[in-house]
């Protein structure tokens, strides 16, 4: 297989969100797409108790040379794909740097502390400004709203993968995406996921 | 059809560490695999169970880890290759058998894979199981990446068969639940036949009975087997050195920590100063290899998780070799260069190396780190762990908590291991007051329930899940009945081993491969041993609460209340709403109600949110699963449920 040049090598990407948003599926789909390009991929993630309403993170290391550790070193994320806005800031605190870029889904999921009134969820405008301040580039898209229009909020994760393809840092082909999700998924579901991927691409191009 | 069970030799795939381990077992021609679910180990048996529909292979979720070891050992005794899988706590459960198995020896290759959880990412402790290898005197291997996870399992089977001993292979969360590229080897045809030879003498390892007696003789044999293992370890390709011939600092490491060490060396750009000795065979250590590597550096940093197991073993060896290689300076957990608790990561190793070599390193500009920290403090409120929306446990603990308050005798609940362990937190209204090992809730309750003669009159409750019930609660419950202990066990039956991903257990009508199996009825078992048994649907709050109150106040002895409702994440139930929920905004009185915002402040289902502007409760339709429970808790009746057509 031909090796593909990357924006950085290793390219360090974090997919973050809240348990139940399809973080693990998104990381596996993207990892398999990169693996099909002959790249070395390492994915590190936590699941189990942390999934029950907690913050979740997948670390992807993509390299044409070698396999890297399943945890990205502090300050070294090139890209953060965030399924939930405040999780973006949490990840930037540990893994961000001035060159980090972000694609952020704007739909909040309130922590129980916010629901109970003990904590405050910042306004989206504040969040946008803070995320912009901490990044080189930040794209904000309403992936969950678009996913609900498509029939199920769970498609938000695949929309974010489509949006990532639109940024062009990684050799992401729609045909690889289709091949990857077709493994063990019935056809109507594949169609819906392809639609979500395309909508993600459109959303980011419209930003 | 799983591609993991297809030949596909020389093809490369992105595999989770656990899938790589399963593939390794298939490539080794494994015939039998048994385990008990536990994060981060569960996907190994799941993968093999799926493969058993394609290949000649028997796979089971055993009732607990000790039985899993026995099932796997039986296959080995009959000459087959067999695999046994569990998380770190499981090795504790099976350790009694483990010690005897080490003494009796094995026949067909027998490999125990145990997955430790440094940092307790999904455990109630970060205890590790490597020391069992030293304790019971059997070989220990630790894969350092995903390809090795596969290849090492295959090698472990061959080693086990050669020396006729169980071999332990230790993984960790960051390998088991991480993914990387793995190139497949060949899958053999499995034509193994099972036959247990037992006609020979006690001293005949191949034809005689398998028994750990006579002890001194068998113990001596066992130590001879370890010596044979060490010979093979000396030139094992799983022990790899990279770096200069005479490094200023030598890092000795294993497992995922080798990837962190590699990363640290790379980021600091010290490839010409620091050597990296990655060990795959960590017990017993191969002395010749160690002497060669240790002799070339004066400073040694041992990088491992969690307790200084490797560090201690290396130090003992270096002390023995001191006349030949001289005195070394050690860095690691003992003298505090690396933290003694929690999991490691590239930055902690990087910090250790930069301290030893006196190099300045900043992960990002100081100003950026400071600003990002300030913003995260205001912008990112923490996320407490909570029960999922629609989780039956929230309803169950709502009832248990309220009934204990109503009862007024300061009763308490002994907790157990499962998703419901979270009931020690606000999401379960802080209901659990003890939390230990699998089954310990009922064992503790059995003890508490006998303290009446010392003046204790608090009601004693225990909870357990359906899978935990079979795993280790049953003996404790029998104990409580036999000793007339006064307790109430609430079985939170959500029809599966939910926490780890809905694996089957003896209470379900299916087995690991999804085939029909006889199910064992929990209520029937409890009745047969003499407990008073009631069954309720926890979503019916009123019925559950009056039943529980009656049991606490009117019955003595062992009472069992089974709260039966399927887990909200189970494949049968997921995305199927029972009710459409809405708030009648004219009926919800908000802050003026006097309920103190019971639904959002106390009940705390994430499907219920608080409308900041409207000052009334609202339903988040994206989150709500339509279980309908909250309609029963609103004192104003403002939460309306409508059956989904």
Image: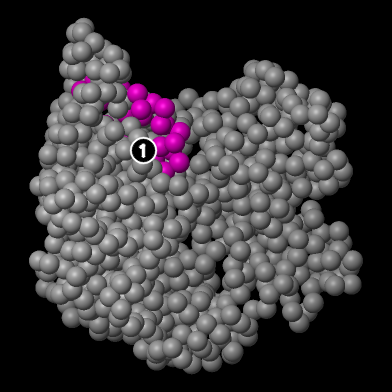
In the rendered view of the protein, which quadrant contains the C terminus of chain B?
bottom right
Residue sticking out furthest to the front: B323
Q: Range of the magenta residues?
A: B71-100
Residue at 89 percent of width and 68 percent of height: B593
Taking B217 as reference, is A65 above or below it? below
| Residue B99 lies in the magenta-colored region | yes
Seen in the image, is A97 located left or right of residue A83? left
Q: Nearer the viewer, residue B131 or B332?
A: B332
Which residue is at a point 68% across and 75% down the rendered structure image? A119
Decide whether the magenta segment is chiefly helix, strand or loop.
helix
Residue A198 position (above or below residue B136) = below
Local crowd at mark 1 within 10 Å, few (<14), some, or many (≥20)?
A: some
B530 and B119: which one is in front? B119
Q: Name the residue under label 1.
A: B132
Q: With respect to residue B206, does B569 lie above or below?
A: below
Q: Is residue B274 left or right of residue A101?
A: left
Foreground pick, A140 / B285: B285
């Amino acid at each position: 297989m031909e090796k593909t040049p990357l924006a950085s090598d290793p390219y360090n990407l974090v997919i973050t969100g809240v348990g139940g948003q399809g973080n693990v599926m998104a990381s596996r789909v993207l990892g398999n797409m990169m693996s099909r390009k002959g790249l070395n991929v390492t994915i590190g993630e936590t699941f189990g108790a942390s999934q029950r309403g907690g913050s979740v993170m997948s670390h992807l290391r993509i390299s044409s040379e070698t396999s890297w550790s399943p945890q990205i070193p502090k300050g070294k994320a090139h890209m953060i794909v965030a399924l939930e806005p405040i999780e973006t800031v949490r990840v930037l605190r540990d893994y961000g740097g001035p060159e980090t870029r972000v694609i952020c889904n704007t739909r909040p999921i309130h922590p129980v502390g916010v629901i109970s009134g003990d904590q405050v969820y910042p306004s989206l405008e504040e969040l946008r400004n803070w995320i912009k301040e901490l990044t080189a580039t930040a794209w904000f898209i309403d992936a969950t709203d678009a996913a609900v229009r498509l029939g199920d909020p769970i498609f938000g994760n695949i929309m974010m993968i489509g949006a990532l393809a639109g940024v062009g840092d990684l050799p992401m082909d729609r045909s690889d995406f289709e091949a990857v999700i077709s493994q063990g998924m019935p056809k109507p579901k594949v169609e819906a996921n392809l639609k979500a991927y395309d909508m993600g691409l459109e959303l980011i191009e419209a930003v | 059809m799983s591609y993991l069970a297809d030949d596909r030799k020389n093809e490369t795939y992105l595999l989770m560490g656990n899938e790589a381990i399963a593939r390794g077992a298939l490539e080794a021609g494994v015939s039998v695999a048994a385990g008990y679910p536990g994060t981060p180990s569960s996907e190994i048996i799941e993968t093999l169970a799926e493969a058993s529909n394609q290949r000649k292979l028997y796979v089971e979720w055993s009732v607990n880890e000790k039985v899993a070891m026995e099932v796997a050992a039986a296959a080995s005794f009959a000459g087959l290759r067999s695999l046994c899988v569990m998380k770190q706590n499981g090795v504790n459960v099976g350790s009694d058998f483990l010690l005897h198995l080490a003494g009796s020896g094995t026949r067909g290759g027998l490999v125990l894979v145990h997955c430790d959880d440094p940092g307790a990412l999904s455990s109630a402790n970060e205890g590790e199981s490597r020391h069992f290898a030293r304790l019971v005197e059997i070989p220990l291997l630790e894969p350092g990446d995903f390809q090795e996870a596969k290849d090492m399992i295959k090698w472990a089977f061959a080693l086990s068969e050669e020396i006729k001993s169980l071999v332990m292979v230790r993984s960790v969360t960051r390998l088991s639940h991480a993914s990387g590229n793995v190139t497949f080897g060949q899958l053999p045809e499995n034509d193994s036949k099972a036959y247990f030879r037992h006609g020979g003498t006690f001293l005949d390892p191949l034809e005689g009975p398998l028994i750990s007696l006579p002890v001194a003789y068998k113990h001596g044999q066992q130590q001879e087997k370890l010596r044979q293992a060490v010979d093979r370890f000396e030139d094992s390709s799983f022990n790899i050195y990279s770096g200069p011939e005479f490094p200023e600092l030598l890092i000795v490491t294993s497992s995922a920590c080798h990837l962190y060490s590699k990363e640290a060396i790379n980021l600091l750009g010290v490839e010409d100063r620091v050597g990296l000795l990655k060990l795959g065979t960590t017990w017993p250590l191969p002395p010749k290899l160690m002497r060669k590597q240790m002799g070339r550096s004066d400073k040694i940093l041992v990088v491992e998780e969690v307790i200084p197991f490797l560090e201690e073993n290396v130090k003992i060896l270096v002390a023995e070799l001191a006349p030949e290689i001289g005195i070394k300076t050690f860095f690691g957990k003992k003298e505090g260069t690396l933290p003694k608790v929690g999991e490691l990561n590239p930055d902690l190793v990087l910090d250790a190396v930069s301290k030893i070599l006196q190099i300045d390193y900043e992960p990002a500009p100081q100003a950026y780190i400071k600003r990002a920290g300030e913003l995260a403090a205001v912008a990112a409120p923490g996320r407490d762990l909570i029960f999922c929306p629609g989780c039956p446990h929230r309803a169950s603990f709502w009832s248990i908590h309220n009934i204990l308050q109503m009862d007024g005798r300061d009763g308490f609940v002994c907790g157990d291991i499962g998703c419901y362990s979270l009931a020690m937190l606000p999401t379960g209204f802080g209901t659990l007051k003890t939390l230990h090992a699998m089954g310990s809730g009922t064992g503790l309750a059995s003890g508490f329930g006998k303290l009446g003669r010392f003046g204790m009159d608090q009601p004693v409750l225990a909870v357990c899940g359906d899978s935990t019930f079979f795993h280790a609660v049953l003996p404790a419950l029998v104990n409580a009945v036999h000793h007339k202990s006064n307790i109430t066990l609430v079985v939170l039956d959500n029809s599966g081993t939910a926490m780890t991903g809905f694996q089957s257990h003896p209470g379900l009508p299916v087995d690991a491969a999804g085939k029909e199996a006889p199910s064992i009825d929990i209520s029937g078992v409890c009745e047969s041993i003499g407990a008073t048994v009631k069954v309720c649907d926890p979503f019916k709050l009123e019925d559950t609460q009056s039943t529980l109150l009656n049991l606490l106040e009117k019955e003595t002895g062992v009472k069992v209340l089974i709260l039966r409702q399927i887990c909200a994440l189970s494949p049968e139930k997921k995305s199927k709403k029972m009710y459409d929920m809405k708030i009648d905004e004219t009926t919800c009185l908000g802050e003026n109600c006097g309920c103190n915002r019971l639904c959002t402040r106390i009940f705390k289902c994430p499907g219920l949110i608080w409308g900041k502007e409207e000052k009334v409760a609202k339903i988040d339709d994206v989150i709500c699963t339509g279980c309908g429970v909250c309609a029963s808790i609103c004192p104003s009746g403002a939460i309306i449920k409508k059956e989904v057509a």
